Amino acid sequence: MIDFENNIEKLYSMMDKCSICPRKCAADRNSGQKGLCNTADKIFIASSNIHRGEEPPVSADNGSGAIFFSNCVLNCVFCQNYPISQLGNGKEVSVEGLVGIMLNLQSRAVHNINFVTPTHYSAQIVKSVHAARKKGLKLPILYNCSGYENIETLKLLEGTVDIYLPDVKYSDDETAFKYSGVKNYVEINQIALKEMKRQVGDLTVTADGAAQKGVIVRHLVLPGNIENTKKALEFIAKELSESTFVSLMSQYHTAHKSNNFKELSRSLTKEEYEEAVNYLELLNLENGWVQNL
Ligand code: SF4
């Protein structure tokens, strides 16, 4: 039996000297101090709406109820949402306001509540979800994150999150630091994904094809970094399982500071993406989705 009130209390206390994410920058967020993620105790969201462009079981027939949070624990040089994630565009909402947004999305018949870039708001999210469930929220909760997660925080999300949609961005720490500015990405990411899999298992869907529970792993193929992709896929196949649902994404385009890096200042080529898809098949990762270039 999970004690959600206790989990909420523990998560909020982690924000006294913040260790909500693996950066553990120790900001006193509960007193209004912002940490490395540019976030204190207040919730800021950039938008909430029906999203039809996610993976097929996430959007399904009626769309996903996406709530985009402002700021991020990573600083990816190629971030395609950088006005939200890096510049912090958004407006403040209260916990009660977030509850209202979830219930409004539910009334519009979406298949899930999709928290996009949620990590730094884990405490507020768990509190809001449980308040919303008391008011009739029935939808699965989807945690759409970078995969750079503190294991202690993740453990406190058990029973709140139904579907994890994490990235495996990198398979070597040097690349992770160069492009996203964080240390030890690989080990932290791999421990986090194993914990997610332990909590919710492989993806299961409803009779009408909507995601119900489980993990979907995303990997964005970066130009000039095919070895990074291959090792990331090897981790998924060998250490999570071949049955893992993988979304292999080709949608890279230059954005934010990507032009500061020669290899990132161009589009992904057809040959690079085909090489990634072929490797996915070689590893018997047959569940999931590839994209058109
Ligand atoms: S969530 Fe933000 S404030 Fe907390 S440790 Fe991470 S970067 Fe620092």
Image: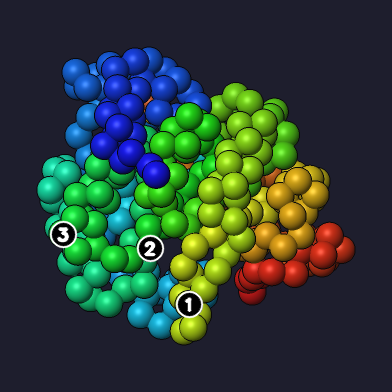
Q: Which residue is mark 2?
A: 140
Label 3: element kind: loop
Horizontal and vertical percent position of residue 4? 31, 40
Q: Which mark is residue 206?
A: 1
Distance CA(mark 3)–CA(mark 2):
15 Å
In the rendered structure, which amino acid carries the disc numbered 1?
Answer: Thr
Earlier residue among tags 3 and 1: 3
User: How many numbered tags mark residues here?
Assistant: 3
Label 2: element kind: loop
- Residue 181, relative to residue 2: is it above or below? above
The answer to whether the residue labelled 3 contacts the one labelled 2, judged by CB atoms less than 8 Å apart, is no
**Residue 141 seen anywhere in this rendered image of the structure:** yes
Earlier residue among tags 3 and 2: 3
Question: Dividing the image into 4 quarters, which one contains the C terminus?
Answer: bottom right
Q: Which residue is mark 3?
A: 135
Q: Residues within 10 Å of mark 3 (few under 14, many from 20)?
A: few
Seen in the image, is 247 located left or right of residue 22?
right
Q: Which mark is residue 230?
A: none
Q: Residues within 10 Å of mark 1 (few under 14, many from 20)?
A: few
Q: Which residue is at a point 39% across and 44% down the rendered structure image? A: 1
Q: Residues within 10 Å of mark 2 (few under 14, many from 20)?
A: some
Q: Quadrant of residue 285?
A: bottom right
In the rendered structure, which amino acid carries the disc numbered 3?
Answer: Lys
Q: Which residue is at a point 25% across and 49% down the rendered structure image? A: 130
In the rendered structure, which amino acid carries the disc numbered 2?
Answer: Pro
Residue farthest toward the front in the current orientation of the protein:
1
- Residue 53, relative to residue 197: is it above or below? below
Label 1: element kind: loop
